[in-house]
Every structure is written in structure tokens, then in C-alpha cells.
Amino acid sequence: MKRLFAFGLTILISIGSAQAGTLETVRQKGTISCGVNVGLGGFSMPDSKGVWKGLDVDACRAVAAAVFGDAEKVRYVPTTGTSRFAALQSGEIDILARNTTFTFVRDATIGLRMVLVNFYDGQGFLVRKDAKVGSLKDLAGGTICLLQGSTHELNLSDWMKQYKTEFKIVLLDTTDVLIKTMLSGRCDAASSDSSNLASIRGAGVPVPDDFVILPDRISKEPLGPMVRRGDDQWFDIVRWSMMAMLEAEEDGVTAANADQMLAESTNPSVQRLLGKSGDFGKLMGLDNAWALNIIKQVGNYSESYERNVGKDSGLKLDRGPNALWSKGGLMYPVPFR
């Protein structure tokens, strides 16, 4: 075992313990164990019937569709900011899909590997409208509440050093506690990923119009799933399951037209994606219809984005940097060839 100190956290990891054969393991148990947030609207949250939904949930559903041909074969494991990495390291979960930021330390030192960015974000600040605060500098000397185990504490520390400004920092365990603490008046601002703040403002507080998100963005937060190091086959399956959703959007393949595109499209890229030509599934130990199953059951990236966090959701977030590269964004599917 090794003790790692990072961002004020102590993380215990087992060096060289990445479990090989995750694909075989999940097939034997019949489900994929997916570590998610304890509840973050738009990304991972159970609905009134207990059905988990969200952009991160769809990342795991896509892998289940690829592996089993059934996107519902997922067991969701709620994790906190401090418990998420240990859950993946120990094998309790097979994928961590919990609005987790891609950083050097996380990718290189804790026995885990970031797979792919599924949402580009930045750290922002939520304040009460009646505080009449226009920017982060207006909060100098105030109290800012953050989630423990996130990148946000170091980001804010760096910002304070750069701009020679001081805040009082309060670290909290979960988003629910963060909301309650802010509503109690203990925090002058809550700070998190801007998407998290939009979720809090949209559904977490009694009167959304009482709060505003400041224009300041003090960090880059490329969010995405993680897997254990040392299992290249599983890494490939998770990464290319997400990539297939991006490729499908670029090629105009949707849940509704996937079968028709399979039968009629003469686009070589579409034929490879949907398994009509090539053995891309077999190269990863899957059926060649793996991507077709993802698209039919989960949809392409645009469909997942819009229903969970975009125009068809309560958050109504613009695509911004999460648009395809051809539309001014950063999402760039790697060629299927």
C-alpha cells in the first residue's frame, strides 16, 4: 500500500493492483458496477421511480449496451468526492462516472486512468442575488463553501495567491450539505463546477431566482469517467463506447434512424461504426453490433447531452465547448478505421 497526499486529501492505493480481466468479471456477474454521484441533476440522479438518469449515467449505459447488448445491465453505486477513487481502486466499481476532473495527479499517481472527456466545464461561484455581488473579487474576505475531495480547493488557493485575495474556506462532504449550508447563510458563495451550480440553482434551492452564478470561471474542468490502470481491453471498451456516441453524432446516426442507416448508408464511416464492415467489436472482445446497440439504446452524444443537460432538460446548458469540433466545440471523435 502507498499513502498519497494530493489536494489536501490522503489517498491509500495498492500499487500494481489494477485488476485484469474486467470484461470477463462483468460478464460473469451480469452487470457493470458504475460509481456515480450521490445525486447531481443532469449527470447522475435517480428519478421519482428510482431510475438513474444523466450524462454520466449514459456513459455507463453505453458500456453495458456494448458488452451485453442491454443498456440497463448497470448497478449504480453512489460515491462521494472522498470515497470515489477508493471504490474504483478496490474493485467495488468497474467504472467511475462521477463528474470527475482529469488532472495530472489523478491520471498518473493513483492507479487509475482517465478515459475520455464527456463534459468540458470550469469552476464557478453561486451567490444570493440580493448580495449584489458582481464578481469573485467582490467577495474578498467572505466565506466560500466547497466540496471536499474536489479540485476546487487547490483552484481557489491558486487564484487567491495570484490575485492576493483571501477567502474563508469551508469544506463539505456532499452537494446536499453544500446547499443546506448555503441556505443557512453560513456561506457567502458556493463554488463547484459551473454545471453543478446550474443543477443546484435549477433544482436544489427553493427559489432559483434568488441566486445567480457569477461570470468568473477560474479553472478548466475536463470531466469524464475513469477506470483502473492495467486493463487495456476494458479501457478500450469504455473509451470507444463514448467515442461511438460522438462519431454517431458527426455522421448523423441517431437512436431513431440507426437501423435504417445500417441498411441503407453507403458512407464507409457509418458502415464501420454500425458493424456492417470491419471487425471492430471483435478487436475488443465484443459483438460487431456493439456500437449499433449503444446508439439504438442510449443515442448519440447530442441526444444524451440535450435530454440530460441541454435544451430538453431543466438545466438548458448551451453546448459551448461541448459541441463537435466542426461546430466550434472541443468534441472530436477519433476516426473508426
Image (spheres, grey):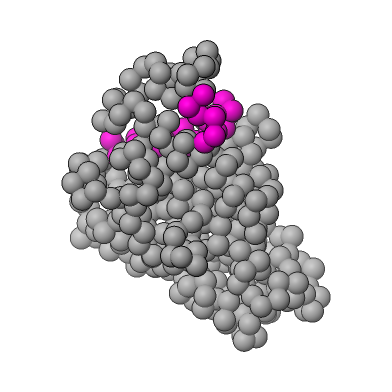
The answer to whether residue 298 shows anywhere in this view is yes
**Residue 117, percent across and down?**
50, 44
Residue appearing at x 51%, y 51% in the figure: 55
**Residue 142, percent across and down?**
67, 79
> Front-most of 329 and 102?
329
Residue appearing at x 58%, y 46% in the figure: 305
The answer to whether residue 18 shows anywhere in this view is no
> Front-most of 255 and 282?
255
Residue appearing at x 57%, y 52% in the figure: 308
Whether 38 is drawn above or below 195: the answer is: below
**Residue 35, percent across and down?**
37, 58
* Magenta-colored segment: predominant secondary structure: helix
**Residue 290, percent across and down?**
37, 32
Q: Which residues are magenta?
A: 232-260
Whether 195 is drawn above or below 30: the answer is: below
Whether 334 is drawn above or below 315: the answer is: above
89 left or right, relative to 291? left
218 left or right, relative to 94? right
Magenta stretch holds residue 167: no
Q: How many marks?
A: 0
Residue appearing at x 63%, y 32% in the figure: 325
> Front-most of 160 and 67?
67
> Front-most of 161 and 305?
305
Q: Quadrant of the N terminus?
A: bottom left
Magenta stretch holds residue 246: yes
